[in-house]
Image: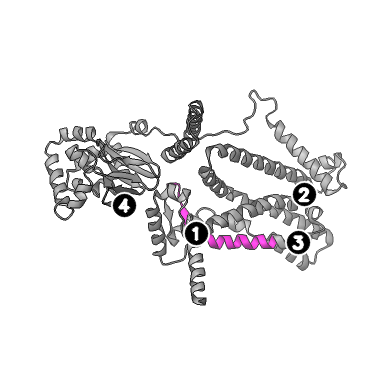
Amino acid sequence: MESTQANTRLGFFKRLHLPQINKLALSIFGSEAAIEEECDRQQQTGHWVIHPLSPLRHYYVMFMVLLTFVNLVTVPLEMAFFGEAFGSISNIRLAFNFFCDILFLIDICLNFRTGILTEDSEIVLDLKAIRKEYFTTWFIPDILSAVSIDLIIILMDHGSKTTEIQTGKMIKVLMFARVFSLLRVLRFSKLVKFFCDLQRDLEISLQLFFRITFLFVMMILLCHWNGCIQYFVPMLQEFPSDCWIVKENILNSTFEEKYIFCLFRAVSHMVRISYGSEYPPTVMVNNDGSESTFKKKMQHLEDYMTYRKLPRELRARIREYYKARYEGQWINEKSTLSLVSRSLREEILTVMCGNLLKNCPMFQNCDINLISSIILKLKYEVFLEGDVIIQQNAPGDRMFFIKHGQVIVETSSFQEELCDGGHFGEMTLLTREGQGATVRALSTCRLFSLSVDDFDQVLQEYPDAMITIQSEQRCEEFPNKQRKYQLYNL
């Protein structure tokens, strides 16, 4: 009994660092089968690595987001006001700083064991590649920001035999070194990436609220940092007679009064930065044209659905389709590919779907020029979970290749599931007969299709190719796969 419970706990902790099935993972891998293959790939590496899409990584990042924001508030206060802000709780403040320094050091160690999600949505789990990437990017800023300035101050304060005045000046200089802790702000780009992933999984109606909230928090932090700097600079100069603090007569005021004055001065400076300019300042500029266009298209679609009073369930499916089809960016792929040469266009499409044709028996022994011509005719399509891609007995007009996703092929007496790299509907190209089975999407499916008209157009350029294709299909389906031949009479 105890061994069973121990194995269960071990299995739970083991699953924490493996990718789980969720919206983000499905958007990257495309199907549940691909996610399971990724789990197998991670386990076969032979060493312990935290997957960037694992629950452990998500929980850890959320905790570090909270801890980083707390540091972004407390570090400037310590740097500027020191004992005034935390005089009554100095021991607690010191313990918290040591706790944060230890966690940031642990974070450095964990980064050597954490996989990387690249901009191309590729997962890197090789330890050498992880170390190389970390050393060339965030290692030095992380080391500098994890230095325990409090420990250095304590050691120098107790070990120095200089006068009190010299020691006080030295501590002020060391407090300036506290600015190195603000290098943790450089890691804010990773936090922004996490927020972007979170925003991508939100509904369209919540994304604007999320962005405004995030902008509001950032504005408050910037005002806070600016206010602390307003006090910190005169403090380093030992408050000269012409500084604003002496002129405002707040040198001997309480911490609260000083902070309010500093915050007011910071806000005043930030508001007046663009004073007198010809054009009013822009609060937030979105330089991502494709993302902006996508949002405009989505808003236009929302207006149309409201105008036509479509049911709520149908609206939700339409929104889900647009998110899956365009992934937050409106890109006209046809016009974009027309900007490059034919050879580059063939190379791009070969990278995207060349393996799909190689996995199809009817095209395996075809001429390379024929394959290149077919690739140029493929069209990208997206189907949501539950969509009927092909209806039994309906006229057929195209063949499908599965890039990512899972489908089920059904007849009254047979069922078969297909996933990444599979294909169906090939008999439509050869016989022009009606569909022999119903094909339904089990997950969000990203497919490439080849229409009958485009296939006939290619065959006009290669008239002898039809004989080769039919013979390959006949060898594949008969006699060992006669049942599958009948099933795929699509």
Amino acid type, callout 2: Leu
Q: Of marks 3 and 1, which one's residue comes earlier in the chain?
A: 3
The label nearer to you, 1 versus 4, is 4
Q: List the residue tagged with mark 3.
A: 92
The dot on residue 114 is: 1
109 part of magenta stretch: yes
299 part of magenta stretch: no
Amino acid type, callout 3: Ile
Q: Do the residues bearing badges 3 and 1 touch, measured as CB atoms within 8 Å?
A: no
Mark 3 and mark 1: Cα distance apart in space: 32 Å
The residue most toward the front is 412
Mark 3 and mark 4: Cα distance apart in space: 60 Å
Q: Secondary structure at mark 3?
A: helix
The dot on residue 417 is: 4
Mark 3, residues whose alpha carbon is within 10 Å: few (<14), some, or many (≥20)?
few
- Circle count: 4
The residue sitting at 41% across, 39% down in the picture is 325
Q: Which residues are magenta?
A: 97-121
Q: Of marks 1 and 4, which one's residue comes earlier in the chain?
A: 1
